[in-house]
Amino acid sequence: MIAVLTGDVVHSSKMSSRQYSQTIETLKKLILAEYKKSNARGDIYRGDEFQLHYSQPKCALTSALRFKLNIPCTLSLAFGPYDSFNELPSASSGPAYIASGHGLDNANRGDLLLQFVNNTNTSEITKNSPSLSPEGFKLLNQFFNQTLNNLTTSQANLLLAYIDNDFPEHKHLAELMGTSRQNISNRLSSMGAHLVRDYVNYINELLD
């Protein structure tokens, strides 16, 4: 099994030249950072679309969240089998790649769509979870995106720090952020950060 993340920048055509250049530069840095973190490989194509693949699928969801919290983007993350796995996703193929690409077309703008590909027959790709019905998994995704899409900039930055430090104890995060544990606990609680942590852990348990 591999993971494939496909995304595009939201409203890139409405950005100023400076905003667009800064966003693409941030995107390039994110792709490089994911390579250094987990050996994920990716590239940018058609100007504002991008794709990465992960030989370590458990790294993929937190990676997707880093993209989501850093730049305005729509994302499609698929876990599943592949036919060929080469250095870059553009030179690779298989059900997970197809599902990820098609998922981006079907995702609501600004959302993170997550799929499990549970059949090597690409004509039978389903959005499914091993332990939930397709409807239940879709609903879980909707709740997850509701949480992410309602974050303020300050909340998004704090959640990013929480994710980047592997969901540490609040006291440790407070020390890193230079504030009190109570302040961090209150802010994490108000944004539902524990639900994001539990969702990531749940998805990664499904990959075992």
Image (tube, rainbow, N blue to C red):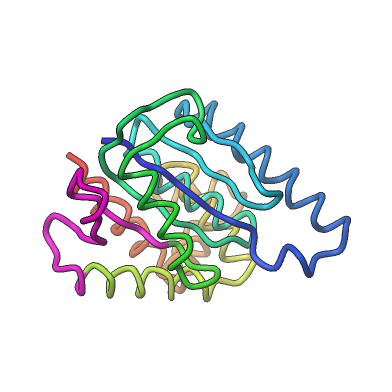
Residue 57 rendering spot, x and y as whole percentages: 33, 38
Give the farthest residue toward the left. Answer: 131
Count of all numbered marks drawn on residues in the image: 0
The residue that appears at 45% across and 47% down in the rendered structure is 5
The quarter of the rendered structure image containing the N terminus is: top left
In the depicted view, which residue is nearer to us: 128 or 45?
45
Q: Is residue 127 magenta?
A: yes
The residue that appears at 62% across and 54% down in the rendered structure is 70
Q: Quadrant of residue 3?
A: top left
In the depicted view, which residue is nearer to us: 22 or 200?
22
Residue 13 rendering spot, x and y as whole percentages: 76, 65
Residue 200 rendering spot, x and y as whole percentages: 32, 53
The residue that appears at 47% across and 50% down in the rendered structure is 64
Q: Is residue 75 above or below residue 31?
A: below
The quarter of the rendered structure image containing the C terminus is: top left
In the depicted view, which residue is nearer to us: 50 or 180?
50
Position of 167 compared to 164: left or right?
left
Residue 93 rendering spot, x and y as whole percentages: 39, 36
Q: Is residue 52 magenta?
A: no
Q: Is residue 150 above or below residue 203?
A: below
Position of 180 compared to 11: left or right?
left
Q: Is residue 107 above or below residue 58?
A: below
The residue that appears at 41% across and 43% down in the rendered structure is 4
What is the span of residues highlighted in magenta in the rendered image? Answer: 113-136
Give the farthest residue toward the front. Answer: 123
Position of 32 compared to 207: left or right?
right
